[in-house]
Image (cartoon, rainbow, N blue to C red):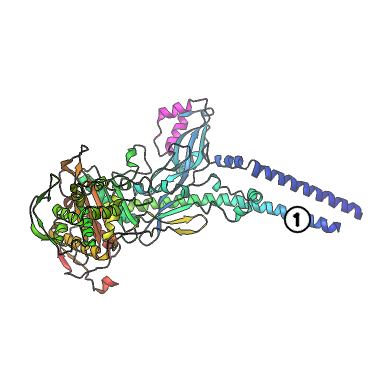
Amino acid sequence: MRAQFRSRIRIVLALVVCAALFIFMRLYFVQIVYGEEYAQKADRQFASGGSGLFDRGSIYFTRKDGTTISAATLSSGFLVAINPQTITDPEAAYAAITAVASSSLSYSAFLAAAAKKTQVYIEVAHHLSEENGKKLAAQAIRGIQVLRERWRDYPGATLAAHSIGIVSYGSGHTLAGQTGLEATYDDLLSRSGDALYKNFFAELFSNVGNLLVSAKDAREGDIVTTIEPEVQTRLENDIANVSQRYASQESGGIIMDPRTGAIIALAMYPTYDANNRQNVNPSLLGNPLAEHVHEFGSIMKPLTMAAGLDAEVITPQTTYNDTGCITVNTKQVCNWDLKARGFIPMKQVIVQSLNLGAAWVAAELGQEKFRGYFTTLFGQKTGIDLPNEGRALLNNLSHSQQINYTTAAYGQGIAMTPLQMIRALSTLANGGIMVQPHLVSTIRLNSGIERKLDWSKTIPVFGAKAVRDTAEMMTAVVDEKLESGKAKIPTMSVAAKTGTAQLTNGQGGYYSDRFFHSFIGFFPSYNPQFIILLYTNDPRNVTYASDTLGSTFLDLTHFLIDYYAVPPDRGFATTTPS
Amino acid sequence: MTSLCVTLVAVLTVAYVGLIAVAMSYAALTVEFSQSVRNDEAAVAVLERQYFVTMTHITKTDYAAAGYTTPSVKVFVPAKSVTALR
């Protein structure tokens, strides 16, 4: 009896072991040998044919209170595909699809697709909402497949489109970042295909270490930008208004923290809707603020002045004899109004924007020192985290003709990107050092680790005394000159400078009636939190930058003071006529 | 001795089958959670889009056209004001 029981137990045990072995073998084949195939099969129950569901890390804006909000994320919904071999009533199918599809679907194109009887899968509509997709699927129309899909979504649409960039197929077969931060941080944002299906069982066999500490989780993640969405919206709106009002070719603006190089807003007009790029001119997809170079005109003068002060060839009290026009290397150089001022101090060079004053400072500096300062300021790329950054054109400074230094002193004959320009001018706002402009402050890895990026590398250029004296001169521009002194803010010192450069005609000369307008400003003047660079290219029926960009700069300044509650830094009269 | 071995094998087998069940449940839950996270992200994106649209609308509002007038006098908060330093 006992032996009989024991043998029965053994039989049962053998059966259990066999069952376990069978399950073990089955699992081995299902998860390891055919694991990928089954994963794709599962995907295709909801995903489009040919690939798994699209997956990618997010890009975030940072609001002033430190909270984040998506600049680029993923949306999910459904696509509709037809099987021409099984579709029985194309007209009814078309009616059912167009009833729920948001995109316009051509009737003739649909019928043409349905007539391709050699094919079994043709996608006819994308980006259906959850509700509409499920509604269509519930109708169970023969020959229509409703499949889950995910796509890149930019909730802000046009907001910071040039900085955020786009994802597209490019020249390859996989979606990848092509421009902007999408391209720069593509390795971090991209996801490998099996992210959705963590094959626990297979990893038990293949890589226990990977199961505990995933290498992918340590290299894939999201990025957090320094862009503040409300400031970005304001800047974009103001820039668009300027461009439209003066029919400019293009306009741009950058708002940066001069102490850290963190870019708070970076706007360009014309722009594009990142969610709808069907009719977008490809030339708009880059970032002109990082890629295109311009001759900026008189906003260069404060840098010339700071160089002269730093080299101690001048002091703020130094005077020069302004004759209105001079001849350098047989070329005539004049003030903007052709008028002579006689003996005047350095401050007036900035306040009245005198070309001859800047030329005189450059001459006092000498070619070698001038070249040294300007090569330090513009000789290198800024290193911003955007692709295809342009280089400054400083060829004129490699020649010995003085006219090249004369014109460079007031911003003509040398060209740089707007980002290089704001970085150089930020030296006047932060004690004389060049910071590294950047758009991304933090990386959030999937492993949960949050890593702050190190942008602390600085390049010393000017001494603190030189930049303070220059900032004082620029503050006088707002207090005394801009809008005839009405722009002065009694409780806030604001430093600024306008720039109006003639546009090159492409034949070695300049147009006499076409201009590039620029505007630089920072506040509070002696401990700035914000530096603003604005420009508009080829505005019509207007000559001076103070007319095109002055009010825009003031609007942004007042907005930033209110929005960030910047405390007053001086206490003049508290009431002023509007 | 034999019974001990048999018991051990039985326990190990049951434990193994249990582990398989746990692994399968874990895999299923992972897939489910991943999808649910993505769905929630998509829902948040819809709300974020509404936020951006509202923000743009406020920024673009022409207050003069809406009937507001420019103030005749601007009063600035003095530097030493308690309010300003708060």
Q: Is B76 rendered above or below residue B25?
A: below
Which residue shows up at 39% across the image and 61% down it? A66
Q: Which of the 4 image quarters holds residue A361? A: bottom left
What residue is shown at x 43% (from left), y 49% (from top)? A185
Determine whether, in the image, residue A102 is placed left or right of residue A250.
right
- Looking at the rendered structure, the kind of residue marked 1 is Leu
Query: What secondary structure do most residues of the magenta stretch adopt?
Result: helix
Q: What stretch is highlighted in magenta?
A: A91-118
* Image quadrant containing the N terminus of chain A: bottom right
Question: Left of A131 or right of it: where is A532?
Answer: left
Percent across and percent down for residue A315 are 18, 64
Choose between A98 and A39: the one closer to the eye. Answer: A39
**Label 1 environment density (alpha carbons within 10 Å; few <14, some 14–19, many ≥20):** few
Residue that extends furthest to the right in the rendered view of this protein: A1
Observer-nearest of A399 and A223? A399
**Is any atom of residue B66 visible in this view?**
no
Report the residue marked by disc 1. Answer: B12
The x and y percentages for residue A57 are 46, 50
Disc 1, SS: helix
Q: Where is residue A257 in the image (x, y as percent from the top left)?
A: 32, 59
Seen from the viewer's position, the closer of residues A551 and A108 is A551
Q: Does the magenta stretch include residue A557?
A: no
Whether residue A337 sits left or right of residue A427 in the image: it is left
